[in-house]
Image (spheres, grey):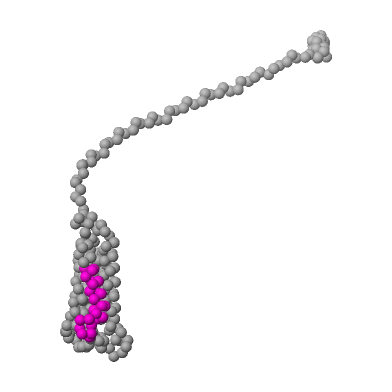
Amino acid sequence: MAGMLQMRRSRGAASGFLLVLLGAWGALIPFIGPYFHYAYTPDTAWTYNTARLWLEILPGAAVLLGGILLIIATGRHIALFGALLAAAAGAWFTLGPILSPLWNNHVPLGGSPAGTTVFLRIMEQLGFYSALGLVIVFVAAAAFGRILSVPSGIPAIETIPPTERIPATETIPATETIPAKQTVPAAETVPAEQTVPARTGPTLTLPFRRARTEALPQRQARTEDS
């Protein structure tokens, strides 16, 4: 259960830092504003009264505290509380001057803008109460939604027992040696082409050659006689 409520600190750090700045502005501006002619009546620096306590100091301190909780919180419940506290204080910045006549004999608390021009009085109204409260509520609501969008938070880290030691991998025997490629015997020598004896046909002896052949011995005999 504790792990379900945890969260990363970075989820609310940026919003918390902005809320710290806005809370410090809301709590200090009525005291330091008169130095640069930005004030509500009474327009003197470091002047304290009950109206400033209820409408500016307390809500500014609440926003500042909510921002610090968002920055340092590691649990969702603390961060959500800080965001809700800042949002409620921001709403009071906007609604406090409007509701204050209900318990102050129909007289608004906090005085009136001390600016000499209409534009400056509008900026004082926005910077002291109305716009300041709206910005604070927006930032706090964004932080609240960002934290709430992860319902499971960061799960608790379970201790995993050490696993059994994995034995070393077995040595794989070498594969059998593949015999060398067998020598293919050369092809048998084809005997030379046998000489086919020419077919000799019977010799035809012409009659005139035979007569001539028979006449040769007779000539040779005559020659010898002569």
State which quarter of the image contains the C terminus: top right
- Which residue is drawn at the image coordinates 26% and 78% (left, top)? 94
- Left or right: residue 196 versus residue 13 is right
- Left or right: residue 125 versus residue 194 is left
- The answer to whether 83 is drawn above or below residue 151 in the figure is below
- Where is residue 112? Give x, y as percent: 25, 87
Looking at the image, can residue 222 be seen?
A: yes
- Which residue is drawn at the image coordinates 29% and 81% (left, top)? 126
State which quarter of the image contains the N terminus: bottom left
- Where is residue 80? Give x, y as percent: 23, 65
| Highlighted magenta segment, given as a residue range | 82-107
Q: Which of these two is toward me, 157 or 65? A: 65
Residue 101: in magenta span = yes
- Where is residue 160? Give x, y as percent: 20, 48
Main SS of residues in magenta: helix
- Which residue appears farthest toward the bottom when viewing the image? 116
The mark total stands at 0
Q: Which of these two is toward me, 212 or 164? A: 164
